């Protein structure tokens, strides 16, 4: 989680922080002074949702020219127009104070059952920097269909019921075009693989 900053950093001064919710993650209301481009100061109020930072990974197999995705119910997607709330995504999860590469290897095993070697770091990015603190570390790794010690599926006590989907790369590109894949990190990683000739 990101701790509120109380120091003045040049063009930003945090004046007040109020916790609005600390149920699952933390929602805070900030009162800040921001120096505008013309040199004047403006006071602003912003709500910021802190859910921690995370990692996501595109698992691919060159020989099969395929990728591994997960399908699971996502309440926010359901509330915003996805009829059944089911989303196709790359394996991903929160860091929970772990190294990003260690965290994503753990998430891959938990969600998909596959065992992978050292993942290749691609970039880190902010998924929604206007309101969410999450910094997302993105990786690539090749998967071996024979290296799957378990079936995955996620953790029942965390409400996870994850279907593992092996999809041809061309079908994944088509799924972005026709709306079957709508998750931003997944789209970014698939297009990265296309642009850089991974598959």
Image (cartoon, rainbow, N blue to C red):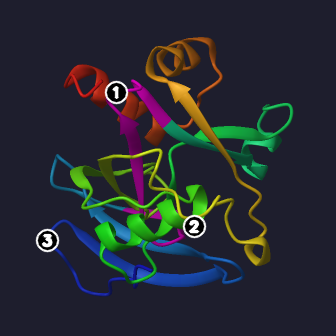
**Residue annotated with mark 2:** 110
User: Percent from the top left, x then y, of residue 33?
Assistant: 33, 68
> Left of 198 or right of it: where is 87?
right
| Front one among 29 and 53 | 53
Q: Looking at the image, which residue is at 30% across and 76% down?
A: 99
The mark that comes first in sequence, 1 or 3, is 3
Q: Determine the secondary structure under disc 3.
A: loop
Q: CA distance from mark 2 to mark 1?
A: 24 Å
Residue 48 in view here: no
Q: Which residues are magenta?
A: 43-67
User: Percent from the top left, x then y, of residue 127?
Assistant: 43, 49
**In the rendered structure, does residue 69 fall within the stretch colored magenta?**
no
Q: Which mark is residue 63?
A: 1
Q: Determine the secondary structure under disc 2.
A: helix
Q: CA distance from mark 1 to mark 3?
A: 52 Å
> Left of 90 or right of it: where is 188?
left
User: Percent from the top left, x then y, of residue 130?
Assistant: 44, 51
The quarter of the image holding the C terminus is: top left
Q: Relative to residue 67, is residue 110 depicted above or below?
A: below
Q: Which mark is residue 10?
A: 3
């Amino acid at each position: 989680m990101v701790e509120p900053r109380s120091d003045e950093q040049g063009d930003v001064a945090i004046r007040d922080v109020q916790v609005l919710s600390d149920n699952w993650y933390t929602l805070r209301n900030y009162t800040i002074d921001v120096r505008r481009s013309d040199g004047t100061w403006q006071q602003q109020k912003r709500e910021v949702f802190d859910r921690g930072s995370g990692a996501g990974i595109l698992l691919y197999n060159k020989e099969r020219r395929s990728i591994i995705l997960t399908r699971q119910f996502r309440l926010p997607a359901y509330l915003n127009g996805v009829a059944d709330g089911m989303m196709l995504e790359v394996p991903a999860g929160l860091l929970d104070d772990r190294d990003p590469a260690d965290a994503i290897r753990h998430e891959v095993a938990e969600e998909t059952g596959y065992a992978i070697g050292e993942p290749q770091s691609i970039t880190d990015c902010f998924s929604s920097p206007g309101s969410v603190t999450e910094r997302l570390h993105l990786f690539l790794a090749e998967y071996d269909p024979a290296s799957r010690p378990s079936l995955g599926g996620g953790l029942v006590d965390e409400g996870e019921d994850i279907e593992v989907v092996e999809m041809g790369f061309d079908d994944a590109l088509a799924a972005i075009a026709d709306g079957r894949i709508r998750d931003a990190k997944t789209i970014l990683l698939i297009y990265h693989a296309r642009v850089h000739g991974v598959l």
